[in-house]
Image (cartoon, rainbow, N blue to C red):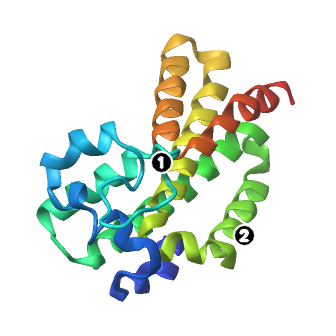
Amino acid sequence: LLAVILYLPTVRHGFVLDDGLVTTINEYVKKGFAGFHDIFTHSYRAGAAITTDSDYMYRPLSVMMFAAEWQFFPDQAWIHHLVNVLLYGLSAIVLFRTLVRMLGAGRIGVAFLAVLFFVIHPIHVEVVGNIKSRDEILSLLFGMLTLYYALKAVGGGYVHLVLSSCFFFLALLSKEGAVTMLAIVPLALYF
């Protein structure tokens, strides 16, 4: 709730800086659902009307979300900002649940304070405030879900392991940096 309250004013912001590369000047995004195939089979900003150095980046999940939002709300920045705010709030909830799982129910206060600090820390303003940074939010969200279900798999069997693997795949589709979960999960399980 605090994350939504803090960042809800960004809904009034427009498209800025690199936002156009994945929204207003991206021909694949502007096709809406019809652009999904192109988005999934090309690099991150391939549909942009200008040349970028992102041929090595593959982040189709956030761009497909932009296309879906464009389908229903073309050229309206507020919807993209609102989705970022809601995803950030959801990420805070998942982070809290993951920390409680790691630290134990007896340390719920520590987990709450850590998440509170995470939510209000000003370093996140750019990620939540810029539309194009959706890839960062999704990578965090799915990375935390990967860890959460990996922790649950220790005592809960195959279903949680499958869920963890699925969320890891979604994290990779969000941003290639999610590959670090291959080290984070085993380390978290060990410690």
Hey, which residue is sitting farthest right in the picture? 191
Q: On the image, numbered disc 2 is attached to which residue? A: 117
**Relative to 174, does residue 83 appear above or below in the rendering?**
below
Going by the numbered disc 2, the residue's amino acid type is Phe
Residue drawn at x 49%, y 33% as measured from the top left: 167
Residue drawn at x 12%, y 63% as measured from the top left: 72
Q: What distance separates the C-alpha of mark 2 from that of mark 1?
A: 36 Å
Tell whether 154 sits left or right of 187. left
**Relative to 91, does residue 145 appear above or below in the rendering?**
above
Q: Nearer the viewer, mark 2 or mark 1?
A: 1
Residue 108 or 178: which is nearer the viewer? 178
* Label 2 SS: helix
Please identify the quadrant where the C terminus is shown. top right
Q: Where is residue 146 in the image (x, y as percent from the top left)?
A: 58, 34
Q: On the image, numbered disc 1 is attached to which residue? A: 55
Residue drawn at x 75%, y 58% as measured from the top left: 109
Q: Position of residue 181 (x, y in %)?
A: 67, 35
Q: Where is residue 83 in the image (x, y as percent from the top left)?
A: 35, 65
Check residue 135 in the rendering and tell me which mark sits there, or answer none: none
Q: Which of marks 2 and 1 is nearer the N terminus?
A: 1
Going by the numbered disc 1, the residue's amino acid type is Asp
Q: Where is residue 53 in the image (x, y as percent from the top left)?
A: 52, 57
